[in-house]
Image (cartoon, grey):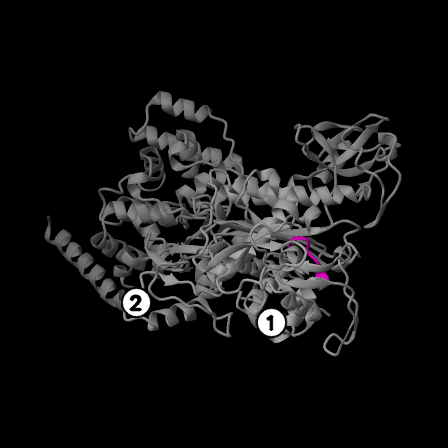
Amino acid sequence: MTKLGLFFLVLGIAMIYGLYKYYEPELPSVESIKEYRLQVPLRVFSEDGKLISVFGTKRRIPVAIEDIPEHVKQAYLAAEDASFYSHPGFDIKGILRAVWQIVTTGEKQGGGSTITQQLTRNVFLTLDQTWTRKIKELFLAVKLEQTISKDEILELYLNKIALGHRSYGVAAAAEVYYGKTLNELTLAEAAMLAAPPKAPSRINPVTNPERATQRRNYVLGRMLELGHITQKQHDEAIAHVDTAYIHEPIIELNAPWVAEMVRTQMIERFGDDAYTDGYEVVTTIHAEKQAAAEVALQKGLHAYDRRHGYRGAVQKYDLSGDYDLEKITEELSGFPQPGGLQAALILEVDEENALARLGDGQDIALTFEASEWAVPYVDNYRVGDKPKNLTEIIKEGDVVMVKRGESGEFELSQIPQVQGALVSMNPDDGSIYALVGGFDYYLSKFNRATQAKRQPGSGFKPIIYSGALDHGMHASSIINDAPIVFEDDKLERTWRPENYSEKFFGPTRLREGIVNSRNLVSIRVLRQMGIRNGRNHILKFGFNPDDVPSDLSIALGSPNVPIIDMSRAFSVFANGGYLVQPHLIKSITDQNGEIVFERQPLQVCPDCKFDITTATEDAGMSEVAIGDMLNQATDEPLPIKPAPRVISAENQFIIESFMKDVIIRGTGTKAQSLGRNDLAGKTGTTNDQMDAWFNGYQRNIVTNVWVGFDTPEPMGRGEVGGRVALPIWIDYMSVALEGEPEFQRPIPPGIVSARVDKETGKLLKPGQPNGLLEYFKVGELPEESEQQAQTDYDDLF
C-alpha cells in the first residue's frame, strides 16, 4: 500500500470514527433489543385450547427461528440479504452500489440495506429518507450484530416485518394470504411471501397479484443462483398459479359474547396494551358445551318463533320483466346471515315446490311439506289460517330466510324476534362452562346473560322457601292457597295475585307449593317469615341489594336480576350451600409464555378447617374480600380460598328434594327425557308470560335459561318456562352431561325422615294410613296433637 493509500485509509477510518462520536449521543441503546416486545394481538382460548377470538389491529404470530422452515428463511435471504451470515451488519458492496447509482443517475434505485439495517430502522429509527438516518442505521446495525446473534436478528426480522393487509411477520402472512401454517407453505408460496417487504401495501399477492408474481419469480431465480433450490424446483414453482386471498383468523369456537367479556376485562386490567402485548387468555369455557349451548338456544328460539307464525318476506324484487339475476345474487350475498340463516330469492313457485337463489349463486329447492309451519303471524296471541299450499306462503320475487333442516335440506325460516340467554357454570368454583347472550351476536351485541335484568318469576321460589326453612317452617307446614288482596303502600296499588291456573287449592304443604308453583302459597310464606327476613335471605345468594325491593312481590320473583346472578344463586343449591363467584378468565400469559395472572377462585371445600355457617349482610362482597377475610381468620394462608357457606346442608338438602320433585311430577317433567335421577330445577314465568325461565342443575353443572323480548311484551298464551325455556335446557344438558355419572347426594347428619299425613302435614304414628315420607331438620318434626293442628289452621290467612 502506498503512503497516499495509507493516508486515505487512515483518513477514512478517522472520518468514520468522528461521525460515530458525533452521532453517538443520539443513538439509542441496542441493548434494549433483548427486551424488545413485538406488537402481538390479544388471543382468547377456551379451556381446552380452541381459539375463540383475536383482538388487535396487527396480525402477528411470533415464531422461533428453529420453527421457521428452511425454504422460508432462504427465500427472504435470497430476496433481501444473501450475505447476511457473513457481513458485519452492513454490506459494503451494496453500499457502494447504491452510491454509484446516486452518482450516475441522481437517485437511489434500491438495494444497499441489509436485514440487520432494516431491523434497526424498523425498531429504533424513523423511515425518513435522509443521510443522517442512513448513517445512524449503519452504526446501529454494527452495534446490533455485536449484541445479539445472527439467528436472533433473523428471527426478530421475520417476526416484525410488515407484509401487507395488517399481517406482520411470516407466520401471520402465511395465515392471512394462504390460511396455512409456515410448515404447510409450498416453495412458491414461501417465495411469494418474500415479495412484499419492498412495498407491502402495493406488492402483495392480493392487492397486485401481477407485480407480486414478478417479484416472486425474481426471488425464485435468486434462490436458484444461490444453490438453495434445483432447476426442477424452480421451474415447478414458477409454473405455480398463486391462489392467495384474505383469510380471517381461524376461529375454532364461536363464542363472541365470551370474547367481548374477556376483551372488556383485559382493557380494564392492561389498558390499550392488551391489544398489542401478545397476551393469551385461557377462559373457563368448555368448547363442546359452548357449541351445544349456542345450538340449543337458537333451536329453542326458532321453535317459539315458528309457533307464532310467518311474518313474510324480508324484501321483494319485481321479476315480471327483465331483471339482472347476477346483480340480485350479489345483493343477496350482502344480507346478514345470523344463526346459520341465508337470504334466498324465490325464482319459481308452485303448490308443492319452489326454486330459490342463494347469495353464493347456488339454486336450492324448498318444499311445502317443510314450510307448513308458516301460518300467517297476527300477533303473539293469534295466527292466521293454515296454508293449503306453498303459493299461499311465498311468491316469486320474495327474499326469504332459509336454513338447513335436520334432514340436510334447505327449508323456509326467519330471524326470531324473541331473544334468550344461557349460562352454564361449575357450582364448585364459579367457572363458566358456556355463555350465550342472544340469538346472534352480529345482529345484536347486547349480552343478555350479563347485561339484561329480568324478573325470574317462580324461579325465585326455591330461595324464598329456603328462607322459610330457616324461619320456623318445615317441609310439611300447611299454607293456605286461597285468594288474597293487598293494599300495599310500597306497591302503590291494590294487588290481587293469582296462580297461573287461576284456581285455588286450599291448605297446601310447603313442598307442594313449590312443586306446583303456587303463587299464593309463596306470598303467604314470605309474609309469615317477614319481608325483611326474606329479603336478607335472598341477599345471601349473592344478589345486588339494589335489585331486590322490600315488598311482598319478591315472593313471586319481581326483582330484576341478571341471568348470570341466577346461575350463581342456583349454584348454592347444587354445591351443598356455598356461595361462589362466577368468572370467565382462568389464566393470562404474556408473549414470552409467562403467566401474569392465574385465577384462584372461591371453591367449595366442606373439609376445610375454616368455615362460614352464615353469610355476612353484605352478600355481594367481592371474591378478593371474602378470600382476605378467610385468610385473616386462620393462622396461615389457605391453599385455596374456601367459599362461604350461606345455607346449611340440611336446608339445601330439603330444597333440593323439592326441586327434584319439580322434575318428577311438577312443572319440569319434560326433563325426565334425559333419563337421569339426579336433576333438580325450577321453572319461572312472569306476568303475561313476558319472561320464561328454567333454572336447573346436576350436582356438577348449573344451567339457567331465559327467553323473552328485549322490550318486555307478552310472549303469548301458554308460553311458560316449561314450554319455552326448558326444552333449551334439555337440549344443552343432553350434551353437557355426557359421561357424567349420576350423583346421589348423601343425607346430611342433621336430617331425619318421617311419615306425615298428605292432607294435614301432621306426623303420623306407625300404621296410620294416607301417609308419605318427608324430610325434616333434626328437632323440627311436626306435632302430632290435634290442638297443634288446629293452631296451624288458625294461623292461615
- Which residues, given as a range, are shown in magenta? 515-520
586 relative to 615, above or below: above
Q: Report the quarter where the C terminus lies.
A: bottom right
x and y, in percent, of residue 447 in the image:
61, 57
Residue 386 relative to residue 685: left or right: right
Q: Is residue 248 visible?
A: no
**Residue where numbered disc 2 is placed:** 637
Count of numbered badges drawn on the protein: 2
Label 1 neighbourhood size at 10 Å, few (<14), some (14-19), many (20+)?
many
Pick the front one: 313 or 87 = 313
Query: Was residue 558 drawn as part of the magenta stretch in this picture?
Result: no
Pick the front one: 129 or 172 = 172
Eye-nearest disc, 2 or 1: 1
Pick the front one: 741 or 622 = 741
Secondary structure of residue under mark 1: helix
x and y, in percent, of residue 274 in the image:
44, 59
Quarter of the figure with residue 187: top left
x and y, in percent, of residue 221 in the image:
37, 30
Secondary structure of residue under mark 2: loop
Q: Residue at x 66, y 61 (%)?
A: 454
Discs 2, 1 touching: Cβ within 8 Å: no
Quarter of the figure with residue 569: bottom right
389 relative to 429, above or below: above
Q: Is residue 660 visible?
A: yes
Q: Amino acid at mark 1?
A: Arg
x and y, in percent, of residue 702 in the image:
53, 51
Mark sitting on residue 535: 1
Q: Amino acid at mark 2?
A: Pro
Rounded to the nearest angstrom, the CA distance separating label 2 from label 1 is 33 Å
Mark sitting on residue 711: none
